[in-house]
Image: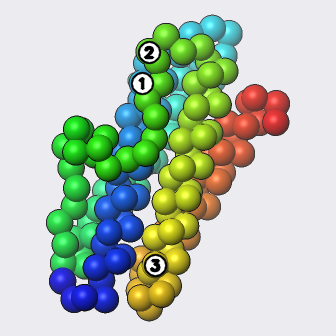
Amino acid sequence: MSNSHKPVVGALRQVVADSYALLGQTHLCHWNVRGPGFFALHTAFEEQYTELFAAVDEIAERVRALGALAPGGLSNLAKLSTINELEEDANAEVMVAHLAEANEIVVASLANARDVAAEANDSESEDLTIARIQAHQKTIWMLKSYLGE
Ligand SMILES: [Fe+2]
């Protein structure tokens, strides 16, 4: 790995960890959501974690393309990520608010990676992170709309 890639790799590894944490939280909500919003939320959460699973694969493979290793393993990823874990019995509104906040943490992580990539003249990593920010902002909009915000 060339020296100019090091900060980008560090930032992208953080994105992988935060994205994986969000993926796990979204899957948990898909399983445990209850109440009148069940059908809509159960389906929406599945769409979100499916999209995220493909995205996290792209980001981890970008880390590999830069000559570094991708982070993995649930305990290792959990240690790296700053996203809080939800209680299993959280109600639907708490779940949606939690996921909106978790998506915002991933956006912050991506924005850092975008800026670090720009600084390193790594336009490909910059492009990847910009596209991911847009995807998460759309998810945040949907989650907040459910909450009436
Ligand atoms: Fe399912």
Q: Which mark is residue 57?
A: none
Q: Earlier in the sequence, mark 3 or mark 1?
A: 1
Q: Residue at x 31, y 72 (%)?
A: 9
Q: Locate residue 75, reporting x and y percent.
A: 22, 38
Amino acid type indicated by mark 3: Val
State yes or no: Cβ of the residue under disc 1 lies below 8 Å from any atom of ligand 1: no
Separation (CA) of disc 2 from disc 3: 36 Å
Q: Residue at x 24, y 38 (%)?
A: 74
The answer to whether residue 90 of the structure is visible from this angle is yes
Return the residue nearer the eye: 131 or 74. 74
Pointer 2 residue: 88
Task: Answer above or below: position of 120 versus 14.
Answer: below
Mark toward the viewer: 3 or 1: 3
Taking the image as shown, residue 46 lies to the left or right of residue 69, namely right
Q: Residue furthest toward the right?
A: 148
Number of marks drawn: 3
Q: Residue at x 50, y 68 (%)?
A: 112
Q: Earlier in the sequence, mark 1 or mark 2?
A: 1
Pointer 1 residue: 28
Task: Confirm or deny contact between disc 1 and disc 2 (CB under 8 A).
Answer: yes
Amino acid type indicated by mark 1: Leu
Pointer 3 residue: 116
Crowd rating for badge 3 (residues with CA inside 10 Å; few <14, some 14–19, many 20+): many
Return the residue nearer the eye: 82 or 45. 82
Q: What secondary structure is marked by label 2?
A: loop
Q: Locate residue 10, reporting x and y percent.
A: 32, 69
Separation (CA) of disc 1 from disc 2: 8 Å
Separation (CA) of disc 3 from disc 1: 32 Å
